[in-house]
Image (spheres, rainbow, N blue to C red):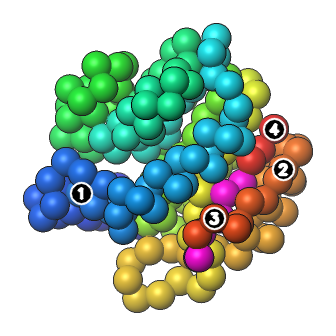
Amino acid sequence: MSNRDQKAFYREQLARYGSCAEGVGWQSSHTQRRRFAVIEKAMGPLSGLSVADAGCGLGDFLLYLRDRGNVPARYLGLELLPELVEEAGRRTRAEIRRCDILADRLPAADWYLCSGAMNRLSPLETRLFIRRCWEASRKGFVFNLLEGRSASDGFTRHRSREILGYCRSLGARTRLIGDYLDGDFTIVMR
């Protein structure tokens, strides 16, 4: 999927739903928070660490961490869509940069995370996204994807075992988490 298609999808979601979980393509704020909980648990305490949120959307993950009292020493949101960069900066008062994860130079961070931003990428783009975030991280990369075969809804689905194998081929110690929502899985790369 091209960046233009990504931008069109998110602009349409924002216009339809506004600045909320559904406005960045989530089914609901409940499912968004379930995914966030898995990612937070995988990373552990973040005090003193830097976190880069690849495809940060509205900055909801940082707001979630603040609510939980698990705030990193440095948070950097990376987002493709200028409107989301602006809105995430306004909502979080954190550093949010416009960034194309597939093409731009990525800053180093202790942890990289991605929640949902790869769900409209092609399988090849997804692997490139994973590799680039892994290479920019010092401790690891945690991300979620949709499980199964791709359907006509525009979302890309993957076989978790294939993605796990790809992550291992990059030299990462990996862990698969898949028992928190139907059709969803998280991979922890260390």
Viewer can see residue 189: yes
Nearer to us: label 4 or label 3: 3
> Which amino acid type corresponds to the residue marked 1 in the rendered image?
Gly
Which mark is in front, 3 or 1?
Answer: 3
| In the depicted structure, whether residue 153 falls above or below residue 55 | below
Q: Quadrant of the N terminus?
A: bottom left
As shown in the figure, which amino acid type bears the numbered disc 3? Tyr
Q: How far apart are the alpha carbons under marks 3 and 2?
A: 18 Å
- Going by the numbered disc 2, the residue's amino acid type is Thr
**Residue bearing mark 4:** 190
Residue to which mark 3 is pinned? 180
Local secondary structure at mark 2 = strand
Which of pointers 2 and 4 lies earlier in the amino acid sequence? 2
Q: Earlier in the sequence, mark 3 or mark 1?
A: 1
Specify the segment rendered in magenta.
Answer: 182-187
> Which structural element holds mark 1?
helix
- CA separation, marks 2 and 4? 6 Å
41 horizontally vs 79: left or right: right
- Label 2 CA crowd tier, 10 Å (few <14, some 14–19, many 20+): some
Task: Point out the frontmost of discs 4 and 1.
Answer: 1
At 68% from the left edge and 25% from the top edge, which residue is drawn?
45
Q: Which residue is mark 1?
A: 23
Residue density around tag 4, few if under 14, some if 14–19, many if 20 or more, within 10 Å: some
Give the residue at x 25% y 41%.
84
Looking at marks 3 and 2 on the same chain, the residue that comes earlier in the sequence is marked by: 2
What secondary structure prevails in the magenta region?
strand
